[in-house]
């Protein structure tokens, strides 16, 4: 049974039958065919077929990035119709939270919108845990403003002027003389968020070093959207997927002249592009059939599911590389 914890507004608290995927040969996954068929037009490589054990049983707890969460939720719900014997609890309390739980041995699977840190890997090793990295999608961080704001683009330097830890700017005009003398209202993910960490690292050149004064933070991206949509002087940032879902409410700024689009994110042209990951306990992959099943099911469904929820999918080459690593 899949239980989505009601942690923030965008997460529908749904409970559906769920299950997973396995190394034992039971049936060939049709999801692999669907995934490869829905990949980008220029993609010629197909996702590999994988064997599914539809009778696998067990339970899995997942936590981590709120950006990765919607993809995890979509894949779990898709699996529910095929394999009813797995119970899965998933939550999106932030990359840092999920990775901490993983390296402490509290969970076997964590979603992350940033790469795991060397010190986190070192702690995991001290705890006797080896971790496998799996890229499941691609994302860009959209910097958004109110739709009535006349500003259409911004530079990384101007973003730093606003979001630096020592920033004291209060109005748009203080950032750029050509902009209106409107009060800045800032909205951002919380400190446990991989989005916050990635943004501060790339804009402020130091991860987790960012402005805290006069910034409303939330792990609920809907709160950020609502805040920006409700105030002409507002600015916020969050994953590109959430921007796509709310294009009628907020406007994304070009950054350094590059528009936030799927194509620019995949090509790496957009300055705030980033990979999205699952991190998995390697021993669980080997010894727990339910975990092995789930991860392989996740991979063969990742492209199709990402496109269904308007997330930028990983390429088939990326997915196949992950499958190869899992099968070693």
Image: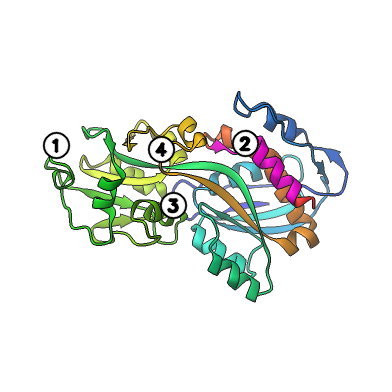
Disc 1 is placed on an element classified as loop
Mark 2 and 4 residues: CB-CB less than 8 Å, in contact?
no
Q: CA distance from mark 2 to mark 1?
A: 41 Å
Disc 4 is placed on an element classified as helix
Residue that numbered label 2 is attached to: 315
Sequence-wise, the earlier of marks 1 and 3 is 1
Sequence-wise, the earlier of marks 4 and 3 is 3
Q: Main secondary structure of the magenta part?
A: helix
Is residue 185 found inside the magenta-colored segment of the image? no
Q: CA distance from mark 1 to mark 3?
A: 29 Å
Residue that numbered label 4 is attached to: 243
| In this view, the mark in front (2 or 4) | 2
Q: Position of residue 150 (x, y in %)?
A: 21, 32
Residue that numbered label 3 is attached to: 195
Q: Which residues are magenta?
A: 312-325
Residue 78 in view in this figure = no
Residue that numbered label 1 is attached to: 178
**Of 31 and 114, which appears nearest the observer?**
114
Q: Position of residue 178 (x, y in %)?
A: 14, 36
| In this view, the mark in front (1 or 3) | 1
């Amino acid at each position: 049974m899949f239980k989505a914890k009601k942690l923030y507004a965008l997460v529908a608290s749904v409970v559906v039958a769920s299950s997973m995927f396995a190394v034992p040969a039971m049936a060939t996954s049709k999801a692999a065919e669907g995934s490869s068929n829905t990949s980008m037009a220029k993609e010629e490589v197909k996702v590999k077929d994988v064997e599914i054990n539809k009778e696998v049983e067990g339970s899995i707890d997942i936590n981590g990035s709120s950006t990765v969460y919607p993809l995890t939720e979509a894949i779990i719900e898709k699996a529910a119709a095929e394999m009813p014997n797995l119970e899965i609890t998933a939550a999106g309390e932030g990359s840092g939270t999920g990775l901490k739980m993983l390296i402490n041995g509290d969970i076997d699977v964590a979603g992350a919108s940033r790469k795991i840190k060397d010190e986190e890997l070192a702690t995991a090793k001290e705890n006797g845990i080896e971790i496998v990295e799996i890229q499941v999608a691609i994302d860009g961080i959209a910097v958004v403003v109110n739709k009535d704001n006349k500003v259409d683009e911004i530079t990384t330097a101007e973003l730093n002027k606003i979001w630096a830890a020592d920033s004291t700017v209060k109005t748009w005009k203080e950032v750029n003389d050509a902009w209106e003398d409107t009060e800045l209202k800032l909205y951002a993910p919380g400190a446990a968020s991989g989005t916050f960490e990635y943004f501060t690292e790339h804009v402020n050149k130091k991860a987790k070093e960012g402005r805290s004064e006069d910034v409303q933070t939330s792990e609920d991206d809907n709160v950020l959207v609502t805040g920006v949509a409700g105030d002409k002087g507002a600015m916020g940032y969050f994953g590109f997927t959430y921007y796509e879902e709310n294009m009628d409410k907020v406007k994304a700024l070009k950054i350094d002249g590059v528009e936030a689009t799927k194509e620019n994110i995949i090509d790496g042209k957009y300055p705030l592009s980033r990979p999205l990951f699952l991190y998995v306990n390697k021993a669980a992959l080997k010894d727990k059939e339910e975990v092995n099943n789930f991860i392989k099911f996740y991979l063969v469904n990742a492209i199709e599911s990402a496109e269904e929820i308007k997330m930028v999918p990983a390429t088939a080459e990326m997915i196949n590389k992950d499958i190869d690593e899992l099968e070693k």
